[in-house]
């Protein structure tokens, strides 16, 4: 494909992990995650093992740890939720740092955090080593229903549009003296994310209209460019 | 006179919540004509456009394209004949690359392989974007995206090109480049716009839609210089712009 195909999650490289076929990487990730999720959360050692496996793959791929760490921030809402569970959940209470929290809640929080973190890290590693287009090709090769692959294709296409929109909203918030990073302003941030969702939903409707206008009938036609190029 | 490419008669439309937007609109556009559809915000222009290719169905009245009525059984053919370029190119360009996007319409019509390639390259050539075929659309400038959006529709070889605010958000150079492209095309055009100088430059005829009704239909020059008419329908010429003082205005558009 043409130049400038970079993506925010992708880290350009030529390692074994980068070169492996996308559908193999996807299948491996899926299998790995199934094993991780199926592991009882009491087996702490197993999770340490899983974590080391992922770190090993990252090391081989040559993607800098800091690059992935910054993108791990996407997990924040889950972390917040996990930290809230011990306070919300019922059951016998235990003292942690002088605060009474629910014991089953604590265990649930650990499970969520461990599985979530390993999952996010493994997925980020896949994203960092595979071009988004290749992920789609891989999914199609794995016989994922066409409609789902289409939805993901649109997600990739519109990610930048939605992020740019969010960027503009954040700038507008800052311009009016509101710091989106400060927890004091999180309610405002949450509301603007709601607005962003509505806007994106409406854009989805407009895109659908534009597709219908060009004869879309529910199935994406095969759109691989023929190899005999007429344009350099 | 020949069958008009676009023939709208007595079109009325109310949205499901009961809000009526169009009250018996009559509009026609003949082969090779470029017609501007003017009107204040909320006049029903976009609603009208969505009727032209059957996205919305008429509550009353008819729309036909080259004699073919816009009814559910003709929708695919109608959507080939009527090419709508939406206002925001990001709504129009949804595929990962420019090539795939321009190919989307013709491919839906069953075009494949070399014929598809030829059609796409031709359409991109018409808007001067052929060398960007393999780029993702979001890496293009806004003006370039607008041009690609026009190409996605041209690739379907429509009988009429419907443009919703084609000059909005364009810098003056991109605006002029788009005008050059539109003038070079041998296609019937209906242009929805607030940009009155653009209408005067490109369209010999203008129609004013106000409160869901056509209140004027005539030479663009005559419409824009009718001060009373313009004022009544919240249409204003930009500061310093006086159609009467443009030299050789009688010959416009070229």
Image (cartoon, helix red, strand yellow):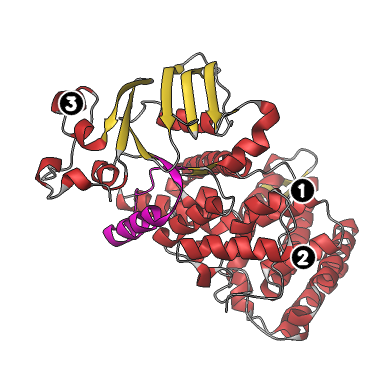
For mark 1, name the chain: A
User: Quick one: B153 or B50, which is closer to the camera?
Assistant: B153
Image mark for residue A137: 2
Residues flagged by tags 1 and 2 on a common chain: yes
Tell me the residue that label 1 is attached to: A147
For residue B214, which quarter of the picture? top left
Secondary structure of residue under mark 3: helix
**Residues at marks 1 and 2, CA–CA distance in whole angstroms:** 13 Å
Tell whether label 1 touches label 3 (CB within 8 Å).
no
Picture coordinates of residue A170 (x, y %)? 41, 53
User: Quick one: A5 or B7, which is closer to the camera?
Assistant: B7
**Residues at marks 3 and 1, CA–CA distance in whole angstroms:** 50 Å
User: What residue is at 31 percent from the left and 36 percent from the top?
Assistant: B205
Q: Is residue B22 visible?
A: yes
Q: Earlier in the sequence, mark 1 or mark 2?
A: 2
For mark 3, name the chain: B
Relative placement, left or right, of B87 versus A86 is left
User: Quick one: A183 or A221, which is closer to the camera?
Assistant: A221
The span shown in magenta is: B161-190
Residue B32, placed above or below residue B139: above
Relative placement, left or right, of A120 versus B149 is right
Picture coordinates of residue A104 (x, y %)? 80, 46
Tell me the residue that label 3 is attached to: B231
């Amino acid at each position: 494909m043409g130049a400038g195909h970079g993506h925010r999650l992708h880290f350009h490289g030529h390692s074994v992990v980068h070169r492996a076929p996308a559908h193999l990487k996807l299948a491996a990730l899926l299998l790995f995650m199934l094993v991780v999720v199926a592991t009882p959360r009491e087996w702490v050692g197993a999770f340490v093992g899983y974590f080391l496996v992922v770190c090993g793959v990252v090391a081989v791929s040559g993607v800098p740890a800091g690059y992935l760490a910054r993108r791990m921030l996407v997990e924040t809402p889950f972390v917040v939720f996990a930290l809230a569970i011990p306070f919300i959940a019922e059951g016998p209470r235990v003292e942690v740092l002088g605060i009474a929290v629910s014991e089953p809640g604590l265990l649930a929080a650990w499970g969520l955090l461990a599985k979530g973190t390993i999952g996010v890290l493994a997925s980020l590693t896949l994203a960092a080593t595979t071009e988004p287009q290749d992920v789609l090709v891989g999914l199609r090769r794995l016989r994922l229903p066409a409609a789902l692959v289409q939805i993901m294709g649109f997600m990739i296409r519109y990610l930048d549009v939605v992020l740019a929109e969010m960027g503009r909203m954040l700038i507008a918030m800052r311009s009016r003296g509101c710091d989106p990073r400060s927890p004091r302003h999180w309610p405002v941030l949450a509301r603007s994310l709601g607005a962003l969702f509505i806007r994106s939903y409406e854009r989805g409707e407009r895109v659908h209209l534009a597709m219908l206008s060009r004869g879309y009938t529910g199935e994406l036609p095969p759109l691989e460019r023929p190899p005999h190029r007429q344009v350099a | 006179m020949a069958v008009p490419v676009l023939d709208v008669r007595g079109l009325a439309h109310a949205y499901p919540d009961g809000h009526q937007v169009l009250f018996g609109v009559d509009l026609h556009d003949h082969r090779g004509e470029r017609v501007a559809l003017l009107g204040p915000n909320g006049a029903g222009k976009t609603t009208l456009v969505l009727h032209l290719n059957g996205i919305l169905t008429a509550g009353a009245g008819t729309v036909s394209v080259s004699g073919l009525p816009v009814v559910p059984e003709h929708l695919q053919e109608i959507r080939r004949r009527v090419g709508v370029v939406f206002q925001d190119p990001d709504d129009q360009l949804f595929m990962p690359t420019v090539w795939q996007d321009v190919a989307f319409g013709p491919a839906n019509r069953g075009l494949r392989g070399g014929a598809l390639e030829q059609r796409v390259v031709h359409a991109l050539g018409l808007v001067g974007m052929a060398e960007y075929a393999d780029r993702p659309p979001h890496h293009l400038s806004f003006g370039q995206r607008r041009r690609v959006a026009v190409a996605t529709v041209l690739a379907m070889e429509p009988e009429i090109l419907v443009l919703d605010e084609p000059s909005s958000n364009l810098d003056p150079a991109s605006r002029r480049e788009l005008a050059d492209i539109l003038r070079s095309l041998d296609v019937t055009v209906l242009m929805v716009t607030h940009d009155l100088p653009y209408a005067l430059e490109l369209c010999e005829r203008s129609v004013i839609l106000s409160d869901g009704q056509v209140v004027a239909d005539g030479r663009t020059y005559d419409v824009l210089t009718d001060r009373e008419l313009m004022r009544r329908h919240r249409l204003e010429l930009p500061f310093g712009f006086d159609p009467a003082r443009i030299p050789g205005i009688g010959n416009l558009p070229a």
